[in-house]
Amino acid sequence: MILRANNIEFYYDPKQKFQIPDINLDSGEQMLILGKSGSGKTTILNIIAGLLKPKSGKVEIGGTDIYTLKGSQFDKFRGKNIGIIFQKPHILAPLTVEENLQLANFFAKENTHLIAPLLKELGIWDKRKAKINTLSEGEAQRVSIARALVNKPKLILADEPTASLDDQNAAAVVRLLQEQAKKYEAALIIVTHDQRVKDHIPNQIIIGGQL
């Protein structure tokens, strides 16, 4: 089992406890977490990614309880095993496309030799020497996807990947994430309020009531 997130509880205010449904995903499986803005979708993603510690419960990735890891050990594990695609690209503007991916390899102490294949497959190989601030929004998003995949993670997490895209490009990005997850035998979770994604991933959790 790639991901087990069980009995998770989180709150800022004990009077407003936030229960997260159990999530169990194996290699190649996909899940969509739907909810309105403010419903807690990103909180779930951050807990699964190890960016936010729950009050109780356990998150295991590849059999490792991620909250037993500390400091640099945790950072290395996350860099190697979890690929995160944030709503706003977390890529470094002063660096080139290629350098951003090399940096991801460096922090995970990996050299997966996937930089060139990924950039070619994502249609941005010709941009490998370009600085991030010269890219279009769509190109920057593809760099984010490449960076998330470059260490062959067990789990891919995407936060609102279609929010600013038109219908055609939204569908293309979801297909791209599904194809890449399948290719690298990773579990995929997409977190969104975008109703257009519902038809692409039947395995769904709805947070905070019906949309």
Image (cartoon, rainbow, N blue to C red):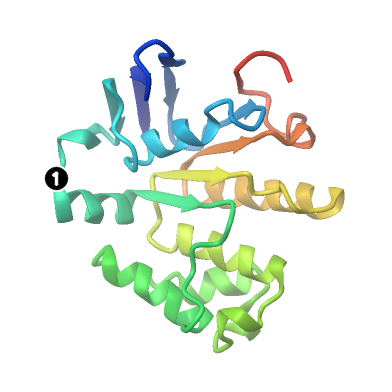
Q: Is residue 191 among the parts visible in the rendering?
A: yes
Q: Is residue 146 above or below residue 100?
A: above
Q: Identify the residue shown where x is 57% and y is 52%.
A: 180
Q: Identify the residue shown where x is 71% and y is 66%.
A: 138
Q: Where in the figure is residue 12, as x and y percent of width and height?
A: 37, 25
Q: Quadrant of the N terminus?
A: top left
Q: Is residue 179 left or right of residue 11?
A: right
> What's under tag 1, amino acid-wise?
Lys
Q: Is residue 166 above or below residue 10?
A: below
Q: Identify the residue shown where x is 24% and y is 37%.
A: 66
Q: Where in the figure is residue 45, as x and y percent of width and height?
A: 46, 36
Q: Identify the residue shown where x is 62% and y is 69%.
A: 140
* Mark 1 neighbour density, 10 Å: few (under 14) some (14–19) many (20 or more): few
Q: Which residue is under mark 1?
A: 70
Q: Residue furthest top?
A: 15
Q: Is residue 205 left or right of residue 8?
A: right
Quarter of the figure with residue 67: top left
Q: Quadrant of the C terminus?
A: top right
Q: Where in the figure is residue 41, as x and y percent of width and height?
A: 54, 31
